[in-house]
Image: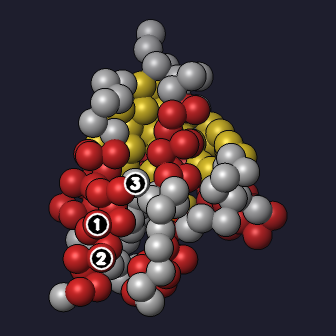
Amino acid sequence: MAKLAIYPGSFDPVTLGHVDIVKRSLTIFDEVIVLIAESAQKKSLFNVGERRELLQEAFKKEKRVTLDTWKGLLMDYAAQKKACAIIRGLRAVSDFEYEFQMAAMNKRLNRKIDTFFMMTSEDYYFVSSHLVREVAKLGGALKNIVPPHVEKKLKEKFRQ
Ligand code: PNS
């Protein structure tokens, strides 16, 4: 049976850190679903449709990657898809507490599905969508931090 993993997140917007995690995940799992988990609490820069388009372009060559969006519990989605794993990237110790709690809660919700953490590559350990949005807003360059089409879209967004 194909090993399917879910890579959930806000992806507001997708960064090269995210792309790196997905590519490395494909060396372990047969298929990866990149899942835009919609959050009512978080105010986003890009709407879900825009985030999906940016992800689509980023992974257009990866035949084993599919995209989806979801408003409910991540573990309900994962069970419905018969996924065996959740993937999350870890950049620094500061990520750990939040990720540890989320993984523990998810495990409580469904014992059959494990969370797998991947250390972010050294090129991207400082990259977060939050900082990307801030740098873009203030006119900074984001080459080698986000894919070129994302940088272009960010420039357009803040020119409006
Ligand atoms: O990129 P982010 O914002 O750090 O991703 C967080 C995300 C989307 C993975 C998390 O908020 C999530 O799983 N949301 C779906 C709703 C859910 O299942 N919440 C309970 C988590 S224990």
Element class at badge 1: helix
Residue 43 image offset from top left, x and y in percent: 36, 83
Element class at badge 3: loop
Q: Kindly report the distance in space between the C-alpha atoms of the residues bearing marks 2 and 1.
A: 5 Å
Location of mark 1 (residue): 152
- The one of 28 and 86 positioned closer to us in this rendering: 28
Q: Can you tell which mark lies on residue 155?
A: 2
Q: Residues within 10 Å of mark 1 (few under 14, many from 20)?
A: few
Q: Kindly report the distance in space between the C-alpha atoms of the residues bearing marks 2 and 3.
A: 13 Å
47 to 63, vertically: above or below:
below
How many labels were placed on the picture?
3
Q: Can you tell which mark lies on residue 147?
A: 3
Q: For the residue marked with disc 1, what is the amino acid?
A: Lys
Pointer 2 or 3: first along the chain: 3
Q: For the residue marked with disc 2, what is the amino acid?
A: Lys
48 to 63, vertically: above or below:
below
Is residue 20 at all visible to an observer of this figure?
A: yes
- Disc 1 under 8 Å from ligand 1? The reply is no
Residue at 63%, 56% (x, y): give it: 124
- The one of 90 and 154 positioned closer to us in this rendering: 154
Residue at 34%, 78% (x, y): give it: 44
